[in-house]
């Protein structure tokens, strides 16, 4: 019999939101591919990435968690016995009850990320279960927190430009993003814009595959973008290139921004950023004159101590030159539909109208290494619940994270699809469904689409969804079973999506004719403190961009304190092999340490040589790769490695520092500074 074809959607933490077509035989996925052209999300355009083509190997692979597991050996050894769901849930509920009785609800820490899960799995019953219990809240500082807060500070709730409008641009500035790897379906749109005459500028310390397609590549030293952006602002002002009409009509805070920019002449900026003054001036002039211009900032901008300042300064630039109001102008930010759902409606339906328990203790994913090892934390963490995340491999300061995960006095539940490096440390592992086995919705942060991921195969092993897990715990913890009913159609209806879209159907989240910023969507800061300068007379939703906010930290540049001890900046960019650590186990990224040939030569290192790379946090032993596409002083290792890759004992995250950005508490992976030597 020929395999059965079915449509679904990809929920992985990738901006593209592809519509998938899978082939199924004997209830097994035999192929994962793209939906035919013309079906589903137009951005998919008939192709998907290579890694998701391998997703069947993951869904049915030997690493899949098939049954609940209960630890029988030392933590970290992955010695488990199988158990029934009932037994495992009883154990977990018992430990949560004990922790609450002995140390209060804040002693329970739910590390719930689910950025590669569907909308319901991520925003459904599990966070509400822990809200109902009044446990600690674990903030998503691991990614995009800084970028999101910067966007809110400048543009409030203004929507992103629609990526489908990219071909209308005549200038595209891609800053700290590498869409050739991490947003591959944007590339054809960039190519189309270039075919129609657009200039592409890429700002990245590496000559990425995106930079290789660009007309100009500017390579700042990592973490110095705030200086580069302020120097552009100063150049625009000094040369009379500011769009005064736009600024007067649509912004506040120009004087504050220009005061912050005043010290940064192009020449002084060149010293700090390593970008030639002439290039800085060229970009300022080009941005002011080539119209329409589009900015696509990336998350590479945020992963350092200056990330918030950099994002805020970069986001202000299009306002200085008035690059808004027409198709092909504006800023491509996150398009997530989740914010359009009525999340509070679900909270009311599940939790009732009772006021939530007293403000929960806030913990941060980005500092898990600290709080999980902090002997003085009051109350201490007694139960850690990890769902939709793999902190052993993905959080900074890995050595401390592992010390925390190995604590005997912390009971750890991991709800997972596969036996990750984190799951190996669990007391109980519960098997999770993949999106091929469960009913859910898929939105994306790089397209204005909402789609259905309906089950295309039966459950693998005894896998359960996140909402089913929450329901199972809720009844054992004395909460109302009906309110915690995990039926997907019920949950979707409550948040405002009824009926569920058909597989392959796309619910447009934003009207196609209303995608232009400062024409169809405007900044709005109404949800935050309303500054005195906020024009109250404007109609709803037509507020101003806030170029500078006196309530926030100054737009300062802080140099890395390591100085000469650790002269190389270690970046850990996304690779085509994985989405974070997901799928890296199938075909791992090359684990070699990339070094610029000059940096290698200065240390007597040749291609393939065994090196040690270290800082105060740890040391890895790896093979060297000479890479002339880096700017000198920059080294790279792949994001998303498992322990078994590369060094074989730890990953790049061993060397990533645990401090956070001041704006939003975002992780600073790319502040890793290292030294390298031949072994
Ligand atoms: N294939 C693939 N796709 C992915 C992911 C993946 O792991 N693999 N991850 C997904 C996720 S979770 C996210 S958040 C996004 C991330 O998407 P991106 O932001 O595109 O990804 P990154 O690789 O983190 O960073 C982008 C670029 O920033 C550069 N960079 C690093 N530091 C600096 C700096 O200080 N200044 C400047 N200007 N550039 C800098 C890096 O060299 C890199 O090329 O991608 C998503 N898509
Ligand atoms: N060195 C370095 N580290 C980084 C970064 C970096 O740039 N450099 N980038 C960071 C970024 S951008 C991000 S987003 C984070 C990601 O950090 P994490 O979210 O911790 O990492 P993932 O690998 O995405 O892990 C997600 C896990 O969720 C599981 N999962 C998927 N769907 C479901 C579901 O429906 N239910 C359940 N229960 N589980 C599910 C997957 O099997 C996978 O193991 O990593 C960060 N780590
Ligand atoms: S990971 Fe991204 S590019 Fe790959 S199939 Fe999923 S949405 Fe598409
Ligand atoms: Mo991310």
Image: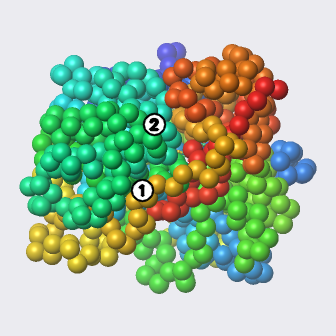
- Residue 397, above or below 294: below
Q: Residue at x 59, y 63 (%)?
A: 364
- Closer to the camera in the image, 108 or 452: 108
Q: Quadrant of residue 195?
A: top left
Q: Is residue 448 left or right of residue 321?
A: right
- Closer to the camera in the image, 481 or 388: 388
Q: Position of residue 94 (x, y in %)?
A: 77, 70
Residue 309 marker:
1
- Residue 668, above or below 25: below
Ligand 2 image position (quadrant): top right
Q: Is residue 131 visible?
A: yes
| Measured Cα–Cα span from mark 1 to mark 2 | 18 Å
Residue holding disc 2: 274
Q: Position of residue 194 (x, y in %)?
A: 24, 22
Q: Is residue 374 left or right of residue 10?
A: right
Q: Is residue 586 visible?
A: no
- Residue 621, above or below 532: above
């Amino acid at each position: 019999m020929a395999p059965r074809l079915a449509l679904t959607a990809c929920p992985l933490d990738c901006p593209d939101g592809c519509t998938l077509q899978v082939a199924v035989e004997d209830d097994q996925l035999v192929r994962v591919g793209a939906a035919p052209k013309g079906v589903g999300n137009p951005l998919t355009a008939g192709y998907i990435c290579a890694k998701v083509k391998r997703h069947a190997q993951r869904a049915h692979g030997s690493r899949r968690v098939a049954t609940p597991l209960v630890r029988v050996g030392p933590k970290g050894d992955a010695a488990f016995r199988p158990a029934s769901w009932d037994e495992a849930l009883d154990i977990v509920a018992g430990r949560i009850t004990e922790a609450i009785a002995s140390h209060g609800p804040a002693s329970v820490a739910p590390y719930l990320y689910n950025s590669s899960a569907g909308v319901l799995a991520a925003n459904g019953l599990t966070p509400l279960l822990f809200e109902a219990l009044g446990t600690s809240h674990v903030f998503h500082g691991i990614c995009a927190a800084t970028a999101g807060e910067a966007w809110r500070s400048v543009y409030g709730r203004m929507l992103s430009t629609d990526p489908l409008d990219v071909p209308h641009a005549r200038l595209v500035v891609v800053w700290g993003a590498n869409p050739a790897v991490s947003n591959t379906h944007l590339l054809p749109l960039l190519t189309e814009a270039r075919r129609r005459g657009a200039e592409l500028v890429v700002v990245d310390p590496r000559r990425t595959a995106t930079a290789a397609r660009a007309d100009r590549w500017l390579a700042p030293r990592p973490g110095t973008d705030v200086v580069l952006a302020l120097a552009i602002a100063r150049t625009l002002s000094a040369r009379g290139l500011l769009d005064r009409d736009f600024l007067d009509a649509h912004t506040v805070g120009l004087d504050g921004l220009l005061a912050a920019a005043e010290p940064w002449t192009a020449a002084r900026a060149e010293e700090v950023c390593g970008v030639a003054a002439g290039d800085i001036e060229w970009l300022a002039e080009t941005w002011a004159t080539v119209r329409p211009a589009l900015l696509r900032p990336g998350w590479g901008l945020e992963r350092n101590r200056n990330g918030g300042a950099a994002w805020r300064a970069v986001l202000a630039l299009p306002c200085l030159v008035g690059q808004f109001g027409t198709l092909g102008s504006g800023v491509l930010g996150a398009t997530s539909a989740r914010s359009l759902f009525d999340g509070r409606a679900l909270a009311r339906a599940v939790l009732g109208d009772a006021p939530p328990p007293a403000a929960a203790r806030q913990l941060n994913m980005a500092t898990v290494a600290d709080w999980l090892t902090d002997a003085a934390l009051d109350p201490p963490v007694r139960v850690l619940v990890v769902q939709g995340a793999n902190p052993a491999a993905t959080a900074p300061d890995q050595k401390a994270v592992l010390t925390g995960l190995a604590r005997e006095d912390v009971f750890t539940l991991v709800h997972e699809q596969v036996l990750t490096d984190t799951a190996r440390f669990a007391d109980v592992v519960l098997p999770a469904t993949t999106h091929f086995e469960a009913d859910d919705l898929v939105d994306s942060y790089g397209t204005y689409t909402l789609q259905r991921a309906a089950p295309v195969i039966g459950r693998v092993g005894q896998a359960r969804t996140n909402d089913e897990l929450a329901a199972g715990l809720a009844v054992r913890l004395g909460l109302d079973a009906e309110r915690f009913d995990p039926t997907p159609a019920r949950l979707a209806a409550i948040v405002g999506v009824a009926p569920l879209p058909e597989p392959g159907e796309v619910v447009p989240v934003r009207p196609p004719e209303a995608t232009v910023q400062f024409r169809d969507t405007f900044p709005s800061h109404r949800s935050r403190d309303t500054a005195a300068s906020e024009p109250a007379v404007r109609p709803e939703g037509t507020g101003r961009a806030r170029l500078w906010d006196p309530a926030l930290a100054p737009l300062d540049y802080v140099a890395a304190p390591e100085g000469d001890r650790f002269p190389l900046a270690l970046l850990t960019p996304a690779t085509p092999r994985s989405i974070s650590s997901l799928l890296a186990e199938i075909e791992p990224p090359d684990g070699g340490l990339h070094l610029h040939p000059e940096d290698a030569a200065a240390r007597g290192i040749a291609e393939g040589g065994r090196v040690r790379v270290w800082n105060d946090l740890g040391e890895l032993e790896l093979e060297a790769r000479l890479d002339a596409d880096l700017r000198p002083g920059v080294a790279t290792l792949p994001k998303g490695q498992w322990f078994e890759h590369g060094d074989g004992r730890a990953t790049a995250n061993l060397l990533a520092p645990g401090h956070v950005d001041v704006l939003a508490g975002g992780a600073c992976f790319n502040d890793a500074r290292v030294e390298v030597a031949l072994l």
